[in-house]
Amino acid sequence: MSSPARKASQPATAASGVSAQVGASSMPRVAYHLPIFAPGLGDKTPASRVAQTTDPQAPLTDGLKRRIEYLRVSLTDRCNYRCTYCMPEEGVQVLPRPELLNFEELAEVIAALMQVGVRRVRLTGGEPTVRKDLLALVQRLGQLGLTDLAMSTNGERLAELAAPLRQAGLTRLNVSVDTLNPQRFTQVTRRGSLERVLQGLQAARAAGFVHTKLNTVAMQGFNDDELGALCRYAFEHDFTPRFIELMPMSGGALFYPGTFLSAAKIRETLQQEFGPLSPLPSSFSEGDGALPGVGPARYLGVPYRGELRQVGIISAVTEPFCDTCNRVRLSATGQLHGCLAYDDAIDLRSVLRSTVQAPKSGPQQSPAMSDVGASVGSEAPMSVSDLDPLRQQLIDAVRSGLAEKRPAHAFTTQGCGGPTKHMVSIGG
Ligand code: SAM
Ligand code: SF4
């Protein structure tokens, strides 16, 4: 577990100036897939684009007719960890609080998107559990009538927050666990405690959360020898393990050479550990847009103690799923990103703040919010005149921005093709 190959190595780029904590410079390089990159992949205006609808309440689609129904909402660009592949050791320059969307503004954007078909929201960050008044926000969003209000977290604060979050209306959890080795855990997170996260996972079960997913960024020379152990831990505790290919965010500065582990290699490792993997029958549905062929994770059946268990693989780099992309991301500052792999975004904060005096965050309800529970959760069709003018402006801004949503990622296995922004600035 603590072979020299699993100790710190040098960063990928001299430009990064970030000291790597995870790496495998002394490990032989594996032969990866050819990078999925073709000229025009990020082209905003391919010939096949269609004009946006003029029907204000038509379901949200992008310019390539992909239906958008899933929103990831970053609550903060701050984090209590500094995962080596996500944040530089010194952290990122955090934004002053007034630059973040307040609760009213967050709820207003979500309510607007619900009117055009968004029904599932995931709260993320940075680390969402460090956002002040998180429980009040979850409670507020829980009243909007969403089908699913989930959260991605590093689990550090779950031991105390799982039960109140459940009570406040959170429906599901994804928890990041890259390793089951306490030293490695502290190494990769630069400050986290595995014990606390495992306690948090138990608290989540005790609080009644089900279908919890364990997200692991799979890295050659760091945790490639733990994929089986992570699956067994997950299976034994009724969690669903998922392995994520390392994505080159931050202009490639945090993408250390030799650490990329492809989906094919992950499958090969799991197959060696558990035996033949199988495509899952359609009954393995999880209600997160993560159905085989629909969401980012592709699920496989893993034979385990006489049963078929599921494991998800998120292969944005070597086996992209862009043709089925159904999501957009709202950054903590109100920038709506059509794609994680590009810097460009639609500035919804300026729409919110140029239209109304932004109310202070807090438990009070603004007039704009007062009808959210009643109108948005309702199945009754609304007439055009029922639409709040601010919501209509938000929807218009989103539609015109999404007309240019990129056709595909341009991530490569060499650490380029991603955004210059950090993951925490866009929202993971
Ligand atoms: N802090 C929370 C957490 O860690 O779960 C939520 C935000 S985090 C950015 C969301 C997910 O993105 C985590 O599972 C994390 O491991 C993953 N992630 C961060 N940087 C990544 C990268 N460069 N490539 C692949 N996944 C990454
Ligand atoms: Fe924080 Fe999550 Fe990024 Fe780790 S992956 S630094 S926990 S935001």
Image: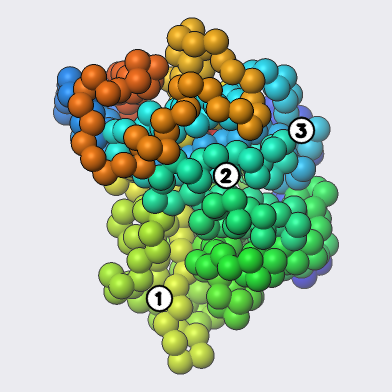
Q: Is residue 182 left or right of residue 277?
A: right
Residue 256 in view in this figure = no
Task: List x then y, in percent, for residue 219.
Answer: 62, 56
The amino acid type, in three-letter code, at marker 1 is Gly
- Determine which of the numbered discs, if any, sits on residue 91 in the image: 3
Q: Is mark 3 within 8 Å of ligand 2?
A: no
Few, some or many residues within 10 Å of mark 1 (<14, 14–19, 20+): some
- Closest to the observer: 300 or 390? 390
Task: List x then y, in percent, for residue 390.
Answer: 39, 17
Residue displayed at 79% across by 61% down: 196
| Residue under pointer 1 | 301
Q: Residue furthest top?
A: 354
Closer to the chain start, of discs 2 and 3, is 3
Residue 168 in view in this figure = yes
The amino acid type, in three-letter code, at marker 3 is Gly
Residue displayed at 75% across by 66% down: 199
- Eyeballing the image, is 1 above or below 350? below
Circle 3/circle 1 CB separation < 8 Å: no
Disc 2 secondary structure class: helix
Q: Is mark 1 within 8 Å of ligand 1?
A: no
Q: Is residue 67 left or right of residue 342?
A: left
Quadrant of the rendered structure where residue 264 is?
bottom left
Distance of mark 2 from mark 3, alpha carbons? Answer: 30 Å
- Closest to the observer: 413 or 28? 413
Closer to the chain start, of discs 3 and 1, is 3
- Closest to the observer: 172 or 11? 172
Q: Is residue 426 left or right of residue 130?
A: left
The image quadrant where one finds the C terminus is top right
Distance of mark 3 from mark 1, alpha carbons? Answer: 38 Å
Few, some or many residues within 10 Å of mark 2 (<14, 14–19, 20+): some
| Residue under pointer 2 | 139
